[in-house]
Image (cartoon, rainbow, N blue to C red):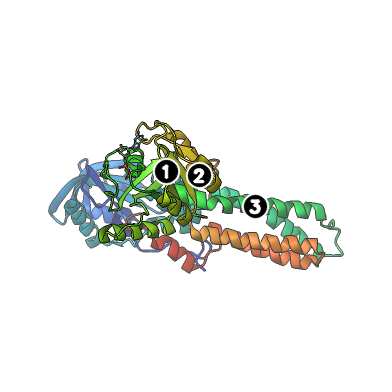
Amino acid sequence: MENRETYSPSSKTIAAISTPQAPGGIGIVRISGPRAREIAGKVFTSKRGKTLDEIKGYTALYGRVHDGDEAIDEAIALNYTAPASFTGEDVVELSCHGGLYLLRRVLKAVFSAGAVPAGPGEFTRRAFLNGKIGLTEAESVMQLIGAQGGQAAKAALAGHDGALEKKIRKIRESLIQTAAHLSAWADYPEDDIPEVNEESLHETLRFAKEELDRLLSQFDAGRAIREGVVTVIAGRPNVGKSTLMNLLSGCERSIVTEYAGTTRDIVEDTVILGDVPLRLSDTAGIHLTEDPVELIGVERARERIREAQLILAVFDSSQGLNDEDRELVSVIRDAPSIAVVNKSDLPAKIDLEYIKYNFKRIVYISALSGEGLEQLKNAVAELLHTAGLNPAEGILFTERQRDAARRAGEGVDEALAAVESGITLDAVTVSIEGAISALLELTGERATEAVVDSVFHHFCVGK
Ligand code: GDP
């Protein structure tokens, strides 16, 4: 087990470039650990002649970074004193001029002065081990770095503020109280501990169950918002797939043409529709063809449809349905799809009854004018259950969190079943303890070293 109780702060002082590895206006070398000020003092000399030991936490010095006698760059040294820093340790951040070459030279000088290279996510890991942030918050730091779109960033920020952690703690506290009461009552029968009221036991377990179920049901929607949804625009040639894709992209990405069958290649693009990033691929239609090049395209389109998380099945409302349209309908049966009845600006000839019979969700749109885009947005949000999701309330972010929540839910289920079937309260206690333990693992308060490792493994160096 590697948790906060058994952790003793590492004596090593670590350093890394903490800004993106790309040219920029400024770049930061971060140093964290007990020797942070001493090491920074060896490579940094302030203009005023003051040392980092002489200034207060959260203040800065302006000066030069050097490697021995050789000057490297002008820099600001920002001083954070333990425990009031991100990692909970002494931290010095050297803000230098951007440019990888310069930053690497500064970092090298810092290593020569006694720091060791930080591992992936090691700053955040230390923050976790020093009790500055919870494991779910650490995970959201990572999400925040990779967030696409407003809702995703909001969700990650909420995680960073501990919204999920608070929610989990609330569930856990009620279970702990119940388990403690049950144990006390069972272990000290001669004392006057009031009998556990079955109704309130039920209520506690139901509350836990409902909260966990809600979190679990929001997981897929949360993931859709964070990672985007693999989306295929399907339909026979000329129904307006490319036009729709361009409407969604807001730019001309695929070739729009009057002639059928020209969109042979699959063009990919990520667009944000409402709250959801759609990872779009424009596909060839599923038409019967002898042309070997087109055949490849058609086969690829079928494959994409099988793998898609969302299919926008496009139909041309100004024409009657043909065999290819029907073929598409049969291919996507049971898949998560929306019928996009396009060209609503033209007189309708399409057999709407057939579409209504085969699709739960239908949107009428003019990809050319943009009319109906809002309805499409709503239909997508409804299908992916992202509509009512408020990421600020805290949602499960990672498979690890989901797995722990699921195990906690199973423990609560067992406890509920035990209560209902009148099994001894001992059995109920054991099940509740199983649930509590899974929840402690979720927030990292009782996570194994392997779990902690795998969380930080995904981080990049410098975070
Ligand atoms: P694809 O083969 O399915 O990709 O179809 P395209 O996007 O290339 O469109 C085929 C033709 O239909 C083009 O001439 C488009 O301008 C036209 N088109 C697409 N959407 C609409 C629409 O909503 N209304 C009208 N009137 N024409 C459209």
Where does label 2 land, which residue?
Answer: 355
Q: Please state which amino acid type lies under the numbered disc 2.
A: Ile
105 and 151: which is toward the camera: 151
Residue 183 in view in this figure: no
- Image spot of residue 161 (x, y percent): 49, 45
Q: Are dots 2 and 1 in contact, CB under 8 Å? A: yes
Where does label 1 land, which residue?
Answer: 315
Name the residue at the left extreme.
70
Q: Quadrant of residue 457?
A: bottom left
331 and 17: which is toward the camera: 331
Left or right: residue 439 compared with residue 307: right
Q: Quadrant of residue 410?
A: bottom right
Element type at mark 1:
strand
Indicate which quadrant contains ligand 1.
top left
Q: Nearer the viewer, mark 1 or mark 3?
A: 1
Where does label 3 land, which residue?
Answer: 171
Q: CA distance from mark 1 to mark 3?
A: 48 Å
Q: Please state which amino acid type lies under the numbered disc 1.
A: Phe
* Number of numbered labels in the structure image: 3
